[in-house]
Image (tube, rainbow, N blue to C red):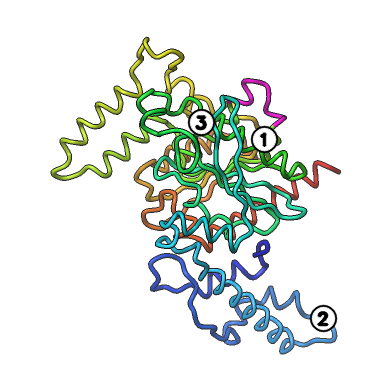
Amino acid sequence: MEGAHPLDEMILKTNQDPYAKYPTLRTEITSVTETVGTYTKYLEKQLDSSNGLESAQEKFNEQYTERLKELLEWQKDPLFNTTFLKDFDGTQKHLLDNEGFKAVSFTTEDGVNLAGLCKLREKAKFNIIVSNGFTPGKKEGMATLLKLFPNSCNMLLFDARSHGESEGNLWRDVLWSKYHGRDEYKDIWAAVEHMNTKAPNARNILYGTCEGAFHSANAILEAQSQGCLDELNIEALIFDSGWDKFVEAGYSVAKQNLTGCYRPLYYGASLLYQTWLKGYDPLISGYRSIQETRDLPHRMSNFPNSIKTVFIHGVEDRDVPIENIRTLHGNRPQGTSVMYESSVPNPHALMQVKDKLRYALWMRKELEALELIRKFQQL
């Protein structure tokens, strides 16, 4: 679907199903003639010397109904169906057979081979590079984003090291070796470099969800510290349901899921988890403190102002409290950061499905704003 339509916001306000579990448009096409008075400002713009009010009402009705039909078809897409998305093989086949994706592979600077799915469009303005959460962490799980972003975007979905079809084993190569959180930024660098080769005229937008957001922010900070940020050509970071602190995120997830009679397991598991990741083992060469090198609260002040930060978080997110992310957003200089807060239940890393209508409209407006900023800078 193309970018935001002038009537989208109006349709969301007037035609949402009040009985739906998540924001969803009513399936019937209802007449809006009786409510035309609510849209006086819109109608006044349509009036001219040759057309009266009746003509403007007819034109409005026609445009409203046409756009509503488009949105109703859009929300029926299988990529909004969580049952469909859980079939990762089936989702991948759908993307390859029906959505124009191609299977790709690329290699990180430390020699890890990564698998991805890439969709390229002619004259695309942005490359959306998607980093997934910790588990299951498969690229197909974020396929819904194809329907949220406008047709002016290319998209790369990829499996991080030791996930999905990419090289490595999560337990053996990452968790057991205590390397989790240390090298994942290199995966994102490799993904960006791949898109710079395939679509060099489009600007890169990093989109990370859950753990992927944490790693995406660190990819930018690491590039800045190593003096290679300009080479990556990054316009913005979209930080969706992201962690602000590495170890504490796992601690919080355990607390939410191990309740009642399982509470003793929580204390034991959290103690082991904290010791395992926080502890320093001199026998493991190159291990560094996660808190000092990766946690974001004490480092976001160094985040480059040239890259816009777009924070997306659920008010009811129990894995990462929204107050933590509000603090990250609030500490960014004015004009360099925006934040979208969703009120849908159980929102962690699922707003693209549960809050799709408002989310898509908001996201498209932000992309349009980025494009306007770029045009202004080129004057």
- Image: magenta residue range: 222-231
Say the numbered circle drawn on residue 193: 1
Please state, as top left, top right, bottom left or bottom right, where the C terminus lies in the image.
top right
Image coordinates of residue 299 in percent, x first then y, are 52, 25
Tell me if residue 40 comes above or below residue 249 in the rendering: below
Q: Of the residues shown, which amino acid type is indicated by label 1?
A: Glu
Marked residue nearer the N-terminal end (3 or 1): 3
Q: Secondary structure at mark 1?
A: helix
Disc 3: which residue: 184
Identity, as a three-letter code, of the amino acid under mark 3: Glu
Callout 3: few (<14), some (14-19), or many (20+) C-alpha neighbours within 10 Å? many
Does the magenta segment cover residue 225? yes
Q: Residue at x 46, y 14 (%)?
A: 286
- Label 3 vs label 1: CA separation? 15 Å
Viewport quadrant of the N terminus: bottom right
Q: Main secondary structure of the magenta part?
A: helix
What type is the residue that disc 2 sits on?
Asp
The x and y percentages for residue 346 are 36, 54
Report the disc number at residue 212: none
Is 327 or 144 nearer to us in this picture? 144
Percent position of residue 91, x then y: 49, 58
Mark in front: 3 vs 2: 3
Q: Residue at x 67, y 67 (%)?
A: 5
- Give the CA distance from mark 3 to mark 2: 59 Å
* Residue tagged 2: 48
Image location (x, y in percent) of residue 268: 20, 30
Camera-nearest residue between 350 and 285:
285
In the foreground, 358 or 205:
205
Identity of the residue drawn at 43% across and 37% down: 324
